[in-house]
Protein backbone atom coordinates (compact mmCIF):
# COMPACT_ATOMS: atom_id res chain seq x y z
CA UNK A 1 0.00 0.00 0.00
CA UNK A 2 1.81 3.19 -1.12
CA UNK A 3 -0.09 5.45 1.33
CA UNK A 4 0.93 5.70 4.97
CA UNK A 5 -1.54 7.23 7.47
CA UNK A 6 -0.29 10.01 9.74
CA UNK A 7 -3.01 9.95 12.39
CA UNK A 8 -4.49 13.15 10.95
CA UNK A 9 -7.53 12.59 8.73
CA UNK A 10 -6.69 12.99 5.04
CA UNK A 11 -3.01 13.72 5.64
CA UNK A 12 -1.10 10.89 3.99
CA UNK A 13 2.50 10.04 3.15
CA UNK A 14 2.83 8.63 -0.37
CA UNK A 15 5.75 6.26 -0.98
CA UNK A 16 6.01 5.46 -4.70
CA UNK A 17 7.24 2.11 -5.99
CA UNK A 18 10.75 2.77 -7.28
CA UNK A 19 12.25 0.71 -10.12
CA UNK A 20 16.05 0.73 -9.94
CA UNK A 21 18.47 -0.71 -12.44
CA UNK A 22 21.99 -0.17 -13.68
CA UNK A 23 20.89 3.12 -15.37
CA UNK A 24 19.35 4.66 -12.27
CA UNK A 25 15.69 4.65 -11.21
CA UNK A 26 12.12 5.21 -12.42
CA UNK A 27 8.91 5.79 -10.51
CA UNK A 28 5.44 7.10 -11.18
CA UNK A 29 5.34 10.38 -9.27
CA UNK A 30 1.58 10.57 -9.70
CA UNK A 31 -1.00 8.12 -11.05
CA UNK A 32 -4.65 9.11 -10.70
CA UNK A 33 -5.83 5.50 -10.72
CA UNK A 34 -3.50 4.56 -7.85
CA UNK A 35 -4.71 7.54 -5.84
CA UNK A 36 -8.37 6.85 -6.64
CA UNK A 37 -7.99 3.20 -5.57
CA UNK A 38 -6.74 4.51 -2.22
CA UNK A 39 -9.80 6.73 -1.91
CA UNK A 40 -7.96 9.91 -2.86
CA UNK A 41 -10.04 11.65 -5.53
CA UNK A 42 -8.52 15.12 -5.57
CA UNK A 43 -8.19 16.41 -9.12
CA UNK A 44 -5.02 18.46 -9.39
CA UNK A 45 -5.23 21.47 -11.70
CA UNK A 46 -2.12 23.50 -10.84
CA UNK A 47 1.52 22.52 -10.34
CA UNK A 48 3.79 24.81 -8.32
CA UNK A 49 7.57 24.69 -8.14
CA UNK A 50 9.93 26.65 -5.95
CA UNK A 51 13.70 26.71 -5.47
CA UNK A 52 15.20 27.74 -2.17
CA UNK A 53 18.62 27.76 -0.56
CA UNK A 54 19.58 26.37 2.85
CA UNK A 55 17.78 27.94 5.80
CA UNK A 56 14.79 29.21 3.83
CA UNK A 57 11.41 28.77 5.49
CA UNK A 58 8.34 29.20 3.27
CA UNK A 59 4.99 29.36 5.02
CA UNK A 60 2.90 28.59 6.87
CA UNK A 61 0.29 29.26 4.20
CA UNK A 62 -3.17 28.15 3.14
CA UNK A 63 -6.06 29.43 1.08
CA UNK A 64 -9.41 29.99 2.77
CA UNK A 65 -12.63 28.39 1.57
CA UNK A 66 -13.93 28.29 -1.14
CA UNK A 67 -10.41 28.41 -2.58
CA UNK A 68 -8.82 25.90 -0.20
CA UNK A 69 -6.12 23.76 -1.77
CA UNK A 70 -5.23 20.12 -1.38
CA UNK A 71 -1.49 19.78 -2.09
CA UNK A 72 0.69 16.84 -3.10
CA UNK A 73 4.23 17.86 -2.17
CA UNK A 74 7.48 16.31 -3.37
CA UNK A 75 11.14 17.23 -3.64
CA UNK A 76 12.94 17.22 -6.98
CA UNK A 77 16.29 18.21 -5.48
CA UNK A 78 17.59 18.39 -1.91
CA UNK A 79 15.95 17.82 1.46
CA UNK A 80 13.19 19.75 3.22
CA UNK A 81 11.33 19.48 6.47
CA UNK A 82 7.73 19.63 5.32
CA UNK A 83 5.22 20.88 7.88
CA UNK A 84 1.44 20.64 7.93
CA UNK A 85 -0.73 22.15 10.69
CA UNK A 86 -4.34 21.07 11.18
CA UNK A 87 -6.50 24.23 11.02
CA UNK A 88 -9.82 22.33 11.10
CA UNK A 89 -11.50 23.75 14.21
CA UNK A 90 -13.87 20.79 14.58
CA UNK A 91 -11.18 18.15 14.20
CA UNK A 92 -9.89 16.26 17.23
CA UNK A 93 -6.43 16.98 15.83
CA UNK A 94 -7.02 20.77 15.53
CA UNK A 95 -3.70 22.53 16.07
CA UNK A 96 -1.66 19.38 15.59
CA UNK A 97 1.67 19.81 13.80
CA UNK A 98 2.92 17.08 11.47
CA UNK A 99 6.47 17.15 10.16
CA UNK A 100 8.31 14.88 7.72
CA UNK A 101 11.57 15.02 5.80
CA UNK A 102 10.99 14.85 2.04
CA UNK A 103 14.05 14.40 -0.12
CA UNK A 104 15.50 13.31 -3.42
CA UNK A 105 16.78 10.30 -1.49
CA UNK A 106 13.58 9.09 0.19
CA UNK A 107 11.27 10.05 -2.72
CA UNK A 108 8.41 10.44 -0.25
CA UNK A 109 5.49 12.78 -0.91
CA UNK A 110 3.00 14.38 1.45
CA UNK A 111 -0.70 14.69 0.57
CA UNK A 112 -2.10 17.66 2.46
CA UNK A 113 -5.90 18.02 2.42
CA UNK A 114 -7.97 21.18 2.63
CA UNK A 115 -7.83 22.80 6.05
CA UNK A 116 -4.10 22.54 6.65
CA UNK A 117 -1.47 25.26 6.78
CA UNK A 118 1.65 24.23 4.86
CA UNK A 119 5.27 25.26 5.06
CA UNK A 120 8.75 23.86 4.75
CA UNK A 121 12.33 24.56 5.72
CA UNK A 122 15.31 23.75 3.51
CA UNK A 123 17.79 21.44 5.22
CA UNK A 124 20.12 20.86 2.25
CA UNK A 125 22.26 23.44 0.43
CA UNK A 126 19.31 23.99 -1.88
CA UNK A 127 15.94 22.39 -2.58
CA UNK A 128 13.54 22.36 -5.49
CA UNK A 129 10.00 21.58 -4.38
CA UNK A 130 7.11 20.69 -6.67
CA UNK A 131 3.54 20.45 -5.42
CA UNK A 132 0.27 19.73 -7.19
CA UNK A 133 -2.82 21.70 -6.15
CA UNK A 134 -6.51 20.92 -6.64
CA UNK A 135 -7.49 24.60 -6.69
CA UNK A 136 -6.02 27.61 -8.46
CA UNK A 137 -4.03 30.32 -6.75
CA UNK A 138 -6.29 32.94 -5.24
CA UNK A 139 -4.23 35.69 -3.63
CA UNK A 140 -7.23 37.33 -1.96
CA UNK A 141 -8.03 34.12 -0.05
CA UNK A 142 -4.54 33.58 1.34
CA UNK A 143 -4.18 32.95 5.06
CA UNK A 144 -1.20 32.01 7.15
CA UNK A 145 0.45 31.46 10.51
CA UNK A 146 3.85 32.81 11.51
CA UNK A 147 6.59 30.18 11.47
CA UNK A 148 7.67 30.70 15.08
CA UNK A 149 4.23 30.65 16.67
CA UNK A 150 4.75 29.88 20.37
CA UNK A 151 1.71 27.62 20.68
CA UNK A 152 2.76 25.43 17.73
CA UNK A 153 6.45 25.52 18.73
CA UNK A 154 7.58 24.00 15.44
CA UNK A 155 11.17 22.76 15.28
CA UNK A 156 12.16 23.70 11.72
CA UNK A 157 15.62 22.15 12.30
CA UNK A 158 17.29 25.41 11.24
CA UNK A 159 19.28 27.53 13.73
CA UNK A 160 17.45 30.88 14.11
CA UNK A 161 20.55 32.74 12.87
CA UNK A 162 20.33 30.82 9.57
CA UNK A 163 16.61 31.34 8.91
CA UNK A 164 15.80 33.12 5.65
CA UNK A 165 12.16 34.20 5.40
CA UNK A 166 10.17 36.71 3.36
CA UNK A 167 9.06 40.01 4.84
CA UNK A 168 5.52 38.95 4.05
CA UNK A 169 5.84 35.78 6.12
CA UNK A 170 7.31 37.70 9.06
CA UNK A 171 4.03 39.62 9.22
CA UNK A 172 1.82 36.51 9.39
CA UNK A 173 -0.46 36.24 12.46
CA UNK A 174 -0.18 33.83 15.34
CA UNK A 175 -2.07 30.52 15.18
CA UNK A 176 -4.81 31.75 17.53
CA UNK A 177 -5.23 35.00 15.56
CA UNK A 178 -5.08 33.44 12.10
CA UNK A 179 -8.09 33.93 9.82
CA UNK A 180 -9.70 30.49 9.70
CA UNK A 181 -12.92 29.29 8.04
CA UNK A 182 -12.25 25.53 8.10
C1 LIG B 1 1.60 30.49 -4.29
C2 LIG B 1 1.66 31.26 -5.58
C3 LIG B 1 2.40 32.41 -5.71
N1 LIG B 1 2.43 33.08 -6.88
C4 LIG B 1 3.26 34.28 -6.98
C5 LIG B 1 2.95 35.34 -5.94
C6 LIG B 1 4.29 35.95 -5.64
O1 LIG B 1 4.54 37.05 -6.53
C7 LIG B 1 5.30 34.86 -5.93
C8 LIG B 1 5.84 34.22 -4.68
O2 LIG B 1 4.74 33.85 -3.89
P1 LIG B 1 4.93 33.45 -2.38
O3 LIG B 1 5.96 34.35 -1.76
O4 LIG B 1 3.57 33.39 -1.73
O5 LIG B 1 5.57 31.98 -2.51
P2 LIG B 1 5.75 30.94 -1.31
O6 LIG B 1 6.18 31.67 -0.07
O7 LIG B 1 6.58 29.86 -1.83
O8 LIG B 1 4.27 30.44 -1.07
C9 LIG B 1 3.96 29.07 -1.01
O9 LIG B 1 4.45 28.62 0.22
C10 LIG B 1 3.85 27.49 0.81
C11 LIG B 1 4.94 26.45 1.02
C12 LIG B 1 2.66 26.93 0.18
O10 LIG B 1 2.26 25.79 0.45
C13 LIG B 1 1.85 27.77 -0.71
O11 LIG B 1 1.49 27.00 -1.84
C14 LIG B 1 2.45 29.01 -1.18
O12 LIG B 1 1.85 30.04 -0.42
O13 LIG B 1 4.60 33.88 -6.71
C15 LIG B 1 1.73 32.66 -7.99
O14 LIG B 1 1.76 33.28 -9.07
N2 LIG B 1 0.96 31.52 -7.88
C16 LIG B 1 0.90 30.80 -6.71
O15 LIG B 1 0.20 29.76 -6.68
Image (spheres, grey):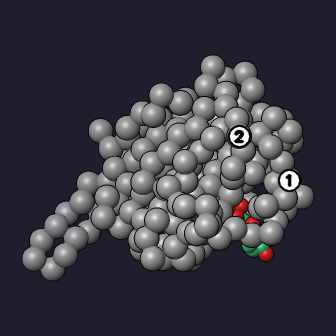
Residue in view at x 61 percent, y 61 percent: 160
Q: Which residue is mark 2?
A: 150
Query: Please, is residue 98 above or below residue 109 in the view?
Result: above
Mark 2 CB lies closer than 8 A to ligand 1: no
Mark 1 CB lies closer than 8 A to ligand 1: no
Q: Position of residue 134 (x, y in %)?
A: 65, 53
Q: Do callouts 2 and 1 mark residues in contact (Cβ within 8 Å)?
A: no
Q: Could you tell whether 44 is left or right of 102 in the image? A: right
Residue in view at x 30 percent, y 64 percent: 105
Outermost residue toward the right? 140
Q: Position of residue 30 (x, y in %)?
A: 43, 58
Residue in view at x 58 percent, y 38 percent: 97
Q: Secondary structure at mark 1?
A: helix
| Circle 1 crowding by C-alpha within 10 Å: few under 14, some 14–19, many from 20 | some
Q: Position of residue 77 (x, y in %)?
A: 42, 74
Outermost residue toward the front? 161
Q: Could you tell whether 20 is left or right of 90 in the image? A: left
Instruction: State whether residue 71 appears in this view.
Output: yes
Query: Please, is residue 39 above or below residue 120 in the view?
Result: above
Residue 141 is labelled as: 1
Please tell me in which quadrant of the rendered image residue 180 appears: top right
Residue in view at x 62 percent, y 55 percent: 119
| Circle 2 crowding by C-alpha within 10 Å: few under 14, some 14–19, many from 20 | few
Q: Nearer the viewer, mark 2 or mark 1?
A: 2
Q: Secondary structure at mark 2?
A: loop
**Mark 2 or mark 1: whose residue is earlier in sequence:** 1
Amino acid sequence: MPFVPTGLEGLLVFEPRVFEDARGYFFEAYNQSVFNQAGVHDRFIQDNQSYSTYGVIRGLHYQLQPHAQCKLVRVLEGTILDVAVDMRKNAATYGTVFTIELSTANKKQLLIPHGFAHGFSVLSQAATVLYKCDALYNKESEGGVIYNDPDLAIDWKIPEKDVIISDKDLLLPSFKNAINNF
